[in-house]
Image (cartoon, rainbow, N blue to C red):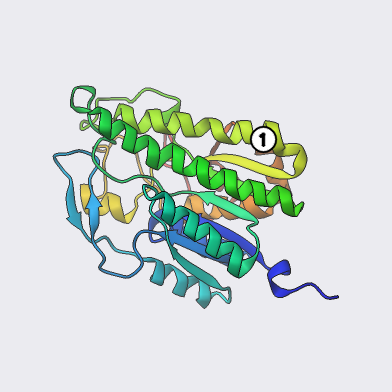
Amino acid sequence: MAPSANETRKVAFVTGASRGIGAAAAIALAEHGFDVVATARTMSPGQQHDYGATKAESRRMALPGSLEETAAAVRARGREALVLRLDLLDRASIDDALARTYAEWGHVDVLLNNGIYQGPGLMERLADLRDDEMRTIFEGNVFAQLHVTQRVVARMLERGAGGTVINMTSGSALIDPPRPAGEGGWGYAYSASKAAFHKLAGILHVEHGRDGIRAFNLNPGFILTEAQKAMHGGDQFGGTFAGAGPDVPAAVIAWLATDAEADALRGGRHVDAQRLCEERQLVAGFRRAEGM
């Protein structure tokens, strides 16, 4: 019996796919032959949500980008898109998105844990950080990703065809900020949540690398996204870092997902997206800013 279309299709499950790195990655994966499950909170253009990494800057607004627009770009490249609402703070929405993915497409080959919590507490200074904010941040930046990964990897192991998990991490997980939050540095809550998340790929590699599960930590570096431009005029860190476009980490994500040479980078190490993009010439003409 010939394999079904669902059995032969390559499926990528992307969180935070409505804009920024997630949307760019969904498009790059489509260009590499993947059908894409695009998940996020923002389904349609103009939908408003609460944004702002501190209590002082928090406000309800609509940012450019939506899952509908990402899906249109995926389909324009000849691939299929499954658009599903997923809120990292809403466990039921996570479980529903996963259930619908497996019901409609049968499997996931690549999981991109890109989405994070966007709200007060992320960039607060220590004196202003509340316990409840810290718990919310860990729910949206650690526990939700663990929940998704556990369920997707379990299905990958059951299927027996291996799979790839790419976790979007951050240099803030490993180094101290150059200046305080609000003056060109970052807050404790954000970096602590990213430090916890950073450990997931390494443990996954040790426990299931022999089962064909490829796990990566990808540090995008400072990326100029729609949220950065809307909230901070393009620079949250006061000129401390030069930014690249979302197409840079997106190209590296597609390379990690498809190139056997990427296997040398599996595990808990930090893969520097901007350095790798330049070395591999994955984006025409891209050069890292000096010092990056």
Q: Which quadrant of the structure image shows residue 202?
A: top right
**Amino acid, disc 1:** His
Where is residue 160? Give x, y as percent: 77, 51
Secondary structure at numbered mark 1: helix
Question: Which quarter shows the C terminus?
Answer: top left
Position of 112 with respect to 133 (left or right) is right
Task: Mark yes or no: residue 31 visible.
Answer: no
Where is residue 87? Give x, y as percent: 38, 53
Q: Which quadrant of the structure image shows residue 106?
A: bottom right
Residue drawn 28% across and 49% down? 228
Task: Mark yes or no: residue 249 visible.
Answer: yes
Where is residue 37? Give x, y as percent: 52, 63
Residue drawn 24% across and 49% down? 51
Question: Which quarter shows the N terminus?
Answer: bottom right
Question: Which residue is under mark 1?
Answer: 205
Depth order, front residue of 8/252: 8
Furthest residue in direction right, as rendered: 1
Position of 281 with respect to 262 (left or right) is left
Q: Which quadrant of the structure image shows residue 210?
A: top right
